[in-house]
Amino acid sequence: MAEQKTTQGNEREEVLLIRILGKDIRGDKSIFSGLTEIKGISWAFSNSICKILNLDKIKKIQDLKKEEIGVIEDFLKDSNVPSFMMNRQKDFEKGKDGHILGADLNLRKEFDIKRLKKIKSYKGIRHSAGLPVRGQRTRANFRKNRRKSGAVGAGKKK
């Protein structure tokens, strides 16, 4: 796939789109910043991928060979990084550390919230009420989540 990028004047420059794990990434980005576009990969995780696979972080994604892209995808599917870098530490269902990427991450997050609501934990009750979960104050903030009531503020005279 190619996307056209306009520069100054009438020159048109072709920019390739590289597909990694179902996500199209612009080819003119570096490997380090391009990998962060995949959901579930942070800057630190992207840095560790480049270090473990001995990739040049500044190299453009469109300059990668198909074999290198395959190596990156295989590593991401079965990542071998320290447990503190993973986003599913001590997983409730599997009982071990893991790293989830892409649409699976959204799905797993929804299931976690549904489980919290079902067991009626404090966090689950806060989620179902539409209130902040992590202990933030609610007096001045989070007013957008409140139900519509007439006593929110002074009305404007016509």
Image (cartoon, rainbow, N blue to C red):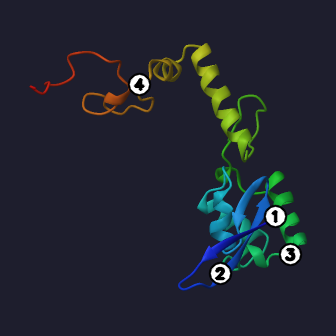
Q: CA distance from mark 2 to mark 1?
A: 30 Å
Residue at 66%, 50% in the rendered image? 39
Instruction: Return the mark for residue 12.
Output: 2
- Which residue bears the numbered disc 4? 131
Instruction: Judge by depth and name the residue closer to the eye, 39 or 144.
Output: 144
**Number of residues whose C-alpha sits closer than 10 Å to that of mark 3, classed few (under 14), some (14–19) or many (20 or more):** few
Look at the picture and state if 47 lies above or below 110: below
Dot 4 lies on which element? loop
Residue at 10%, 26% in the rendered image? 158
Instruction: Return the mark for residue 72.
Output: 1
- Tell me the amino acid under the disc marked 3: Lys
Residue at 53%, 17% in the rendered image? 121
Dot 3 lies on which element? loop
**Does label 2 or label 3 sit earlier along the sequence?**
2
- Which residue bears the numbered disc 3? 65
Would residue 29 be visible to someone looking at this image? no
**Does label 3 or label 4 sit earlier along the sequence?**
3
Look at the picture and state if 40 lies above or below 5: above
**How far from the left and from the top, in percent, is residue 68?**
85, 71
Would residue 102 be visible to someone looking at this image? yes
